Image (cartoon, rainbow, N blue to C red):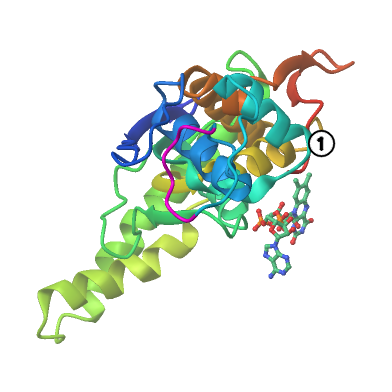
Amino acid sequence: MHVFREPIVTILARQQYEGAAHIRWQSDSEVAGEALAEFAGRVCYLSFGQDAGFEGGHKLIAGRTSNREYLANILKVRHGSVLEHAVWTLLFEGVSRALTHELIRHRHFSYSQLSQRYVDESEVAFVLPPEIRRDSPAFDVWKQSCQRSLNDYRTLLAQIEEQVQDEPSKTLRRKRARQTARSVLPNAAETKIVVTGNCRAFRHFIELRGSPSADTEIRNLALEVLRLLKDEAPNLFGDYRIATAPNGEPYAETDYQSV
Ligand SMILES: Cc1cc2nc3c(=O)[nH]c(=O)nc-3n(C[C@H](O)[C@H](O)[C@H](O)COP(=O)(O)OP(=O)(O)OC[C@H]3O[C@@H](n4cnc5c(N)ncnc54)[C@H](O)[C@@H]3O)c2cc1C
């Protein structure tokens, strides 16, 4: 039985920023999401500087000079819609069905998740809740419970496949057996999910799920997402700090909450 202890987060896709050839303005950030959010914000006030070459006779202003300064102000004044232009796609693996049930409550993300109706889960892995230590009696209870569920899943799968053998479609036969047998798999069953979201949605997720009151598994995931996105786009996520709660556990905090 394979056991996952930590979530695995991979950046699958990030944006490309092309700029506008007819506008004489360049961001000093090479991160597409950062440059794009800055451009979008500057359009609101035409703060590209007087020589930018926009058509239309508007008066152009200079505004703040660096991308870092510009986005820091966006975060400070909570001009959150500007952050929606910066988008990433992440792959989460080694996460439990309990975690994804909480994750998908975040309505501004797009999701594609492993289907337990299409995929045979006879060899499914399980995600160990962070509170259970491997050397504790709780680990034996947890492991035995997962193993029992897996055995029951396999038994049910064979029984229902037998029961629906008159179903002419092989795919439907398998689906009917798997959708029935999966009902006995626990919340700890491992799953994989692709998540696409914008900076604003990721920031909201990090704030809610990186907080001390969040479930520990999803908090570990939120902190891993934060580490990756902070590295990816420091001007959009660099205000977050990973702090230590009184109980010694890490959590995310920022001065620019709820954009
Ligand atoms: C510690 C913790 C405990 C929780 N416990 C429970 C629980 O016991 N039971 C339970 O059911 N859920 C629980 N939740 C889930 C919680 O209620 C939210 O569903 C989840 O955190 C998603 O966040 P969100 O609602 O802010 O929405 P998101 O979908 O992330 O949306 C972000 C923001 O967009 C806006 N928004 C989105 N959709 C709408 C809309 N339809 N109308 C108006 N504004 C909208 C809101 O401002 C919202 O805050 C818990 C969450 C946390 C962090």
Residue 63 vs residue 74, the one in the foreground: 63
- SS class, disc 1: loop
User: Can you tell which quarter of the image residue 113 is in?
Assistant: bottom left
User: Can you tell which quarter of the image residue 72 is in?
Assistant: top right
* Image location of residue 54, percent across then percent down: 44, 46
Q: Quadrant of the N terminus?
A: top left
Residue 173 vs residue 22, the one in the foreground: 22
Magenta includes 53?
yes
Q: Quadrant of the C terminus?
A: top right
Question: Which residue is drawn at the image coordinates 70% and 22% (left, top)?
Answer: 240
Crowding at mark 1 (Cα within 10 Å: few <14, some 14-19, many 20+):
few
* Image location of residue 156, percent across then percent down: 35, 64
Question: Which residue is drawn at the image coordinates 61% and 30% (left, top)?
Answer: 62
Check disc 1 and give the amino acid type: Ser
Q: Which residues are magenta?
A: 50-56
Question: Which residue is drawn at the image coordinates 49% and 39% (left, top)?
Answer: 39
Q: Residue furthest right?
A: 246
Question: Which residue is drawn at the image coordinates 69% and 36% (left, top)?
Answer: 74
Judging by the rendered image, the residue that carries numbered circle 1 is 213
Is residue 242 toward the left or the right of residue 98 in the image?
right
Q: Is mark 1 within 8 Å of ligand 1?
A: yes
View quadrant of ligand 1: bottom right
Q: Residue furthest front?
A: 57
From this view, report whether residue 142 is shown above or below residue 115: above
* Image location of residue 178, percent across then percent down: 31, 65
Is residue 6 toward the left or the right of residue 245 in the image?
left
Residue 123 vs residue 194, the one in the foreground: 194
From this view, report whether residue 106 is shown above or below residue 39: below
* Residue 210 seen in the figure: no
